[in-house]
Image (spheres, rainbow, N blue to C red):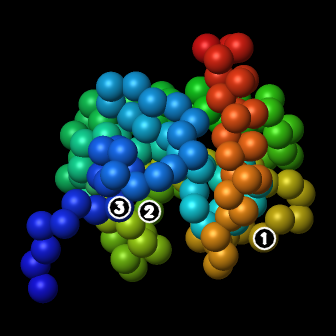
Amino acid sequence: MATTEPCIFCRIVAGDAPCDRVYEDELTLAFMDLFPVGEGHLLVIPKQHHQDIFEADEASLLAVMAISRRIAHALKTALEPDGIGVHQLNGAAAGQTVFHYHMHLIPRNQGDPIALHGRKRGEPAEMEAIAARIRAVLDREG
Ligand SMILES: [Zn+2]
């Protein structure tokens, strides 16, 4: 059935759905993944709706990548993980579950299983606290 409902990420951008916001500018928004696979798992999206890499314009993709880099640095400082996964999926066959282009940033420690989608919702207070720690680093380091 065709629907004109905005997607969940567009609702978050519009402020119609809640999120733990980490960063925002004219083109991009970063917020904590609701179903984290680990501490600090967040998403960077273009504010404009693009389904995937095939639909997105180059400016949106470049903006998401530039902010992903900045936030990866902040995650490294805030959480000191052993590594950070930066992942992006296109199409259901590739594992995409929300059809609004997004980049996953996932801090990982040695031995953590490689997964992109968590099975249970993150603890709200915990996610808000981590978002605040990342925002503090971004504010400090720009
Ligand atoms: Zn959307």
Residue 112, picture quadrant? bottom right
Q: Quadrant of the C terminus?
A: top right
Residue found at x 28% / y 62% = 7
Residue 79, picture quadrant? top right
Q: Position of residue 114 (x, y in %)?
A: 71, 68
Determine the quadrant in which ligand 1 lies: bottom left
* Sequence-first tag of 2 and 3: 3
In the image shown, does 78 or 129 lie closer to the viewer? 129
**How far is mark 1 from mark 2, CA to CA?**
18 Å
Classify mark 1: helix, strand or loop.
Answer: loop
Residue found at x 27% / y 31% = 59
* Sequence-first tag of 1 and 2: 2
Mark 1 Cβ inside 8 Å of ligand 1: no
Q: Position of residue 134 (x, y in %)?
A: 70, 33
**How far is mark 1 from mark 3, CA to CA?**
27 Å
Residue 129, picture quadrant? top right
Which residue is identified by label 1?
Answer: 113
* Sequence-first tag of 1 and 3: 3
Residue 66 lies, with reference to residue 13, above or below; the image says above
Which residue is identified by label 2?
Answer: 89
In the image shown, does 117 or 85 lie closer to the viewer? 117
Residue found at x 85% / y 46% = 82
Residue furthest right in the image: 110
Three-letter code for the amino acid on which mark 2 is drawn: Leu
Which residue is identified by label 3?
Answer: 8
Residue 73 lies, with reference to residue 17, above or below; the image says above
Mark 3 Cβ inside 8 Å of ligand 1: yes
Kindly report which numbered mark, 1 or 3, lies closer to the viewer in this rendering.
Answer: 3
